[in-house]
Amino acid sequence: MIQFPKKFLWGAATAAYQVEGGNVGSDWWPWEKSAGNECSGPACRHYEMYDQDFDLAQGLGHNVHRFSIEWGRIEPEEGKFSREALNHYLAVLLALKARHIEPVVTLHHFTNPVWFAKLGGWEHPRAVRYFLRYTEFVVRALAQYVRIWITINEPTIYISHAYLFGIWPPQVKSLWRMLRVERRMVSAHLRAYRLIHKIYRQESLSGPRVSIAQHMMALVPCTPSLKNRFAASLRHKLFNERLLSIFLRHKALDFIGVNYYSRQLVDVQKWGLRNLLSDTCKAGHHPVKKNSLGWDIYPEGLSQLLLKLKKYDLPLMITENGICTSDDAERWEFISAHLKSVYGAMERGVPVMGYLYWSLLDNFEWDKGFGPRFGLIDVDYATFKRTVRQSALKFSQVAKTGALE
Ligand code: IFM
């Protein structure tokens, strides 16, 4: 039996575009139509149903909830800020507070306002200034209700999918353009970090905790060859730790948000930059179970990553970890194995503050549509009926007692 600390944060994460529905002011809205993808449409109707969803989260013993604010709602036209949208998010925060659930608020989770995208998105020279203006508007209004902020969700996933692989809007395929956007996002985080702290000082509020949610993969050499070990360590440095170390050099992280899902089995065919950065094992070596999107399930990777982050001497939070599956028993197996992995790292001195399962609800999985089911709670997309899954009840026992068999 494992016993987590009393103050551990237990909960789940969501993102506005994936659950709210009707995000007509965001760049994904026109894009998913033009790309011929399954469209987000009303999503889970969480924009209207958040009270009911938070009742469920509270009943499940969650004491933390991560959600994101949709920039395209807050600023539907350049420089015009919507009081109505702001009041909505204020109501969301009050609804969480009334249920004694600590909010973790994300400012950018993959989507941008349509007007911003039309101007050139993150490639526009004023992109960072636009993001900061939005950040200032939101943080000034909501600071007294929020202690934990995530400026940007998974910047490495956003830039690679949108600017290198060309599979998300604006569908660019250029290393140079991706690197330009990366520089902008780095600057956006650094400046937003300072701005958020300044606002809290001006409002005489106690210090906020600000971070990013960093997507991390376990990079495992398929065989212990020099090429594979070198490539795994290079990829870990570039994809997992590089942005974090920049932010840490600038003292611009108060904790580290970790989003962890899977493993990459590194098997490099020949020495060459492209091979070192992308070759994976195709021969089915070291087989593990997979989620319904075909991602390897590799719980031990989470503890290995957390131990690698120990050197930074900062609190860590699992800001996302989850599985899409049609077999709910597999979901509980996944959660319990990953919690044991987290605990293993904590026993070795890694200060983990909390665990947020991805996701509270089944939701819109970007270019994959509504097929993948990540939720603790099943959503019937025809009726919007919510059904709490068995895995959610088992997770709830851990959340309520801190104990895991
Ligand atoms: O759904 C996404 C989320 O938006 C960001 N992290 C990974 C999740 C699963 O793919």
Image (cartoon, grey):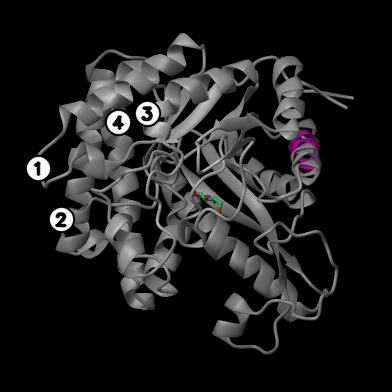
Name the residue type under label 3. Glu
What secondary structure is found at the residue carrying circle 2?
A: loop
Residue 85, position in %: x, y? 23, 30
Q: Is residue 339 magenta?
A: yes
Q: Earlier in the sequence, mark 2 or mark 1?
A: 1
In the drawing, does residue 208 fall left or right of residue 329?
left
Marks 3/4: CA–CA distance: 28 Å
- Quarter residue 140 falls in: top left
Mark identifier at residue 79: 1
**Residue placed under numbered mark 2 in the picture:** 126
Q: Earlier in the sequence, mark 3 or mark 4?
A: 3
In the drawing, does residue 14 fall left or right of residue 313?
left
What secondary structure is found at the residue carrying circle 1?
A: loop
Name the residue type under label 4. Ile
**Residue placed under numbered mark 4 in the picture:** 196
Q: Earlier in the sequence, mark 2 or mark 4?
A: 2
Which numbered mark, 3 or 2, is in the foreground of this view? 3
Residue range corresponding to the magenta coloring? 337-343
